[in-house]
Image (spheres, rainbow, N blue to C red):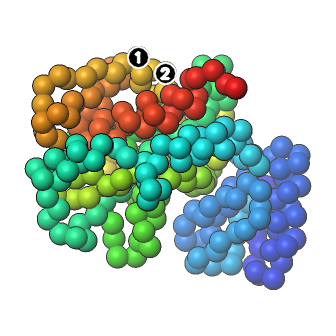
Amino acid sequence: VIIIIHSLFILDGFNHLLSICQYLGYPFLISTAYCWETCIPHAELVVIRHTTRIMIITTGRTKCRDLIPYLPRLERQFQDMANKQGEFPIFSERQLKKAWSKYPLADANNQAAVLVPLVEFQNAANDNDIHLVFTKRSSNLRSHSSEISFPGGGREPQDENVIATALRETQEELLPSPLATMDWAVVGTCTPIPSLHGKAVTAVLGVYRPLLQCSAINEVFPGDSQEVEKVFSVSISALLEGETMQSKSSRMGAGIGAPAYQTEGEDVIWGLTAFLLRPLLHDVLKPTFLSKKE
């Protein structure tokens, strides 16, 4: 079913229509003529950047929902671990100082951001497990080719903040299918840490609102073949089971161990991605999803 709305003046009726779709359990998405727009499950607000024409398309790939049951618990855990600035600390102050001393910022405007994307599947194979989404970078890229990473990249002038950077880069890299929606609930940001190339990299923790009703993440996010060789997901429990730590000093500086995560096949999550992942995994995700519920 495709419904096109030509005027902003009938958004009230549009919101009512979305509410009816939700009540009947129909998944839907929103798009403009120029780019995929955010699907707001509870239909309180629709942001239209480029055009007033809207399409609503039903699909069995995702299921929009008013509430993500675990989101308040996740946000509370994140904030409990955050510093005075409201950011989750990837390193201790001592470790962070050493890292910045070894890899100083080349330019104050040299910033980058990645999204740490959480998704939830609803099928027998994944057993409603929470997964993190990763990309394997294309072998044709000049830097970090064939490495496993979170979607992300450098901040551009049009980005309002690092959150906007992370979401824009995620859309460009994951390349959502025509029957998918880019609807992320941002939980919070982490303290920036240095990359080997003198960039300040900020991780943004986000939850994909729609419930995935497919067997693999690449059915929804096939990935841009120019940048990404493949898009895949790994459950929180599998990441914890596959974690290893190198006792020797890492490239981030003395006293900072080097984590690595074995995934299915020969792919290993290491380097900056692993450094960002480990504290979030142990201090936020594990307590939220794998500890005994109160």
Amino acid of disc 1: Glu
Give me the C-alpha separation between circle 1 and circle 2.
6 Å
Say what secondary structure mark 1 lies in: helix
* Residue 279 falls in image quadrant: top left
Say above or below: 49 vs 195. below
Residue situated in front as seen by the camera: 283 or 175: 283
Residue 237 disc label: 2
Residue 88 disc label: none
- Disc 1 to disc 2: CB gap under 8 Å: yes
In the rendering, at what x and y percent does residue 243 appear?
34, 21
Say above or below: 239 vs 52. above
* Residue 84 falls in image quadrant: bottom left
Amino acid of disc 2: Ser
The structure residue drawn at horizontal position 60% and vertical position 35%, both measured from the top left corner, is: 120
The structure residue drawn at horizontal position 85% and vertical position 57%, both measured from the top left corner, is: 19
The structure residue drawn at horizontal position 31% and vertical position 59%, both measured from the top left corner, is: 112
In the rendering, at what x and y percent does residue 125 appear?
60, 19
The C terminus: image quadrant: top right
- For the image, the number of numbered tags is 2
Mark 1 = which residue? 241
In the rendering, at what x and y percent does residue 107 appear?
18, 69
